[in-house]
Image (spheres, rainbow, N blue to C red):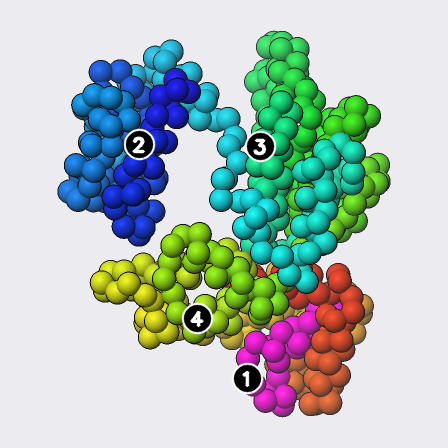
């Protein structure tokens, strides 16, 4: 069934050369081959996608299938509901094998070191990732990369995986999210006391310990999961003692992951800890230009800079805005997206962000982040656990909104403008010098913009 899957990938590649980039990304690329008996059974990601392919690109798809398979083969496209019904009714051994193949993780081929844009914010992370990819198990073990949402941590993990697969194909790599590791561990314990857990435990350890490289994404979610931490600790030790490479990503450093066992924290701290910081404007522009080049988008430089300014906290969001602008221009029949297209395409989104952004919403986001009450942060209380969030709130409101100092002071119990200036300037200085404060502020900005 793996051979059929490879042929299907060739079919998609053939179709890609005969349709526009936008239509390929929207309707063709998401198509999934789920079965092959007398005909190909293809699943689309929506009912609308099915209609679009059958209406506009049925011939291109049919020709590509005949070209790759060497004969004309019938095919049927299913929408998500039809796919579920088909799989329930056709649970054959063949489809089960195919589903198992689908579950095997494949690194995103677009995430490589060559297309990872390096700037001051991520140069050390990139260098460490490259060193680990070139010499797994020999340098920087474990490698722990942390940073806010959408800054490129997953890109680097995939880049490591792609590099190793290309240069050391015999090495066995296991990539999982923390949630998947937890779910696999729970499943290995069995569903009831009468069921033997020996087989499940053996399979679990075979999966996670019989590897050369283990990657765990979003390890912060292991917080509070005592049994999972114990199993991960044992897995970590087994791999580390056998010189197997361990790579971990998180949204915060090990010491700031709540309820993490001391001995596990110690293990995570034993390697190299690198933080992925917010990219500066120049790096964001370079990232967008690379994205446009890879996706064959024709975009004016003015548009690139416009998006880099509007989406300053999240690379993923930034790339999404770029795609939206190009798609909008394509629908209008334009070959190149202009600044006018960008303003029109993003008008609703930017208006919504502007409407949602209020000083109260910023304060509430900070309160949720620190788990404190709104009344406490705006009140007179001066304890350490309240003062820092209050000052950060003042800083964020000052930076993200054009409000008079007196107005900001009124939000915080009528504090005078000199107090507001002091709080704003102190956090601004800490952002420059203290990495922890910088990470917190950037994380909050990302949450506020979301």
Q: Earlier in the sequence, mark 3 or mark 1?
A: 3
Where residue 166 is drawn, which disc sits there? Answer: 3
Q: Please give the residue where the numbered disc 1 appears in the rendered image.
A: 402
Q: Earlier in the sequence, mark 3 or mark 4?
A: 3
Q: Please give the residue where the numbered disc 4 appears in the rendered image.
A: 301
- Residue 400 visible: yes
For the point 49% across and 61% down, which residue is it?
288
- Give the distance between the C-alpha atoms of the residues marked 2 and 1, in whole angstroms: 53 Å
Which span of residues is magenta-colored? 387-408
Q: Please give the residue where the numbered disc 2 appears in the rendered image.
A: 11
Neighbours of disc 2 within 10 Å: few (<14), some (14-19), many (20+):
many
Q: Are marks 2 and 1 in contact (CB under 8 Å)?
A: no
Please tell me in which quadrant of the rendered image residue 325 appears: bottom left
For the point 73% across and 74% down, which residue is it?
427
Q: Which residue is nearer to you in this view: 32 or 109? A: 109
| Left-right relation of 96 to 176 | left
- Give the distance between the C-alpha atoms of the residues marked 4 and 1, in whole angstroms: 27 Å
Q: Is residue 377 above or below residue 111?
A: below
For the point 69% across and 26% down, which residue is it?
212
């Amino acid at each position: 069934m793996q051979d059929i899957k490879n042929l299907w990938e060739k079919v998609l590649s053939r179709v890609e050369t005969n349709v526009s980039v936008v239509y390929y990304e929207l309707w063709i690329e998401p198509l999934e081959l789920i079965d092959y008996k007398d005909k190909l059974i293809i699943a689309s990601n929506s009912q609308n996608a099915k209609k679009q392919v059958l209406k506009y690109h049925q011939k291109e798809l049919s020709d590509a299938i005949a070209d790759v398979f060497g004969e004309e083969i019938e095919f049927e496209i299913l929408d998500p509901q039809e796919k579920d019904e088909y799989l329930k009714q056709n649970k054959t051994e063949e489809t089960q094998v195919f589903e198992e193949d689908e579950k095997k993780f494949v690194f995103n081929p677009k995430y490589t070191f060559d297309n990872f844009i390096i700037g001051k914010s991520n140069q050390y992370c990139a260098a460490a990732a490259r060193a680990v990819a070139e010499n797994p198990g020999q340098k920087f073990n474990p490698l722990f990369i942390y940073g806010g949402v959408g800054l490129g941590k997953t890109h680097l993990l995939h880049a490591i995986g792609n590099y190793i697969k290309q240069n050391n194909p015999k090495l066995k790599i296991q990539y999982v999210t923390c949630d998947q590791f937890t779910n696999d561990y729970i499943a290995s314990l069995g569903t009831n006391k009468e069921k033997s857990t020996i087989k499940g435990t053996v399979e679990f350890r075979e999966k996670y310990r019989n590897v050369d490289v283990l990657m765990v994404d979003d390890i912060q979610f292991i917080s509070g999961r005592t049994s999972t931490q114990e199993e991960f600790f044992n897995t970590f030790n087994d791999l580390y003692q056998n010189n197997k490479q361990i790579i971990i990503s998180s949204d915060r450093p090990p010491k700031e992951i709540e309820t993490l066992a001391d001995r596990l924290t110690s293990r995570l701290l034993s390697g190299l800890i690198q933080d992925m910081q917010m990219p500066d404007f120049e790096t964001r522009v370079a990232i967008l230009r690379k994205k446009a080049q890879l996706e064959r988008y024709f975009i004016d430089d003015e548009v690139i800079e416009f998006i880099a300014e509007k989406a300053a906290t999240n690379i993923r969001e930034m790339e999404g805005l770029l795609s939206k602008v190009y798609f909008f221009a394509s629908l209008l029949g334009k070959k190149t997206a202009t600044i006018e297209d960008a303003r029109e395409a993003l008008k609703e989104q930017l208006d919504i962000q502007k409407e949602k952004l209020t000083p109260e919403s910023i304060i509430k986001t900070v309160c949720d982040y620190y788990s404190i009450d709104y009344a406490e942060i705006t009140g007179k209380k001066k304890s350490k656990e309240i003062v820092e969030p209050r000052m950060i709130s003042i800083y964020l409101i000052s930076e993200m909104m054009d409000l008079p100092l007196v107005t900001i002071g009124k939000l915080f119990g009528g504090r005078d403008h000199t107090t507001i200036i002091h709080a704003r300037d102190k956090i601004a200085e800490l952002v420059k010098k203290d990495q922890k404060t910088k990470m917190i502020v950037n994380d909050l900005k990302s949450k506020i913009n979301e």
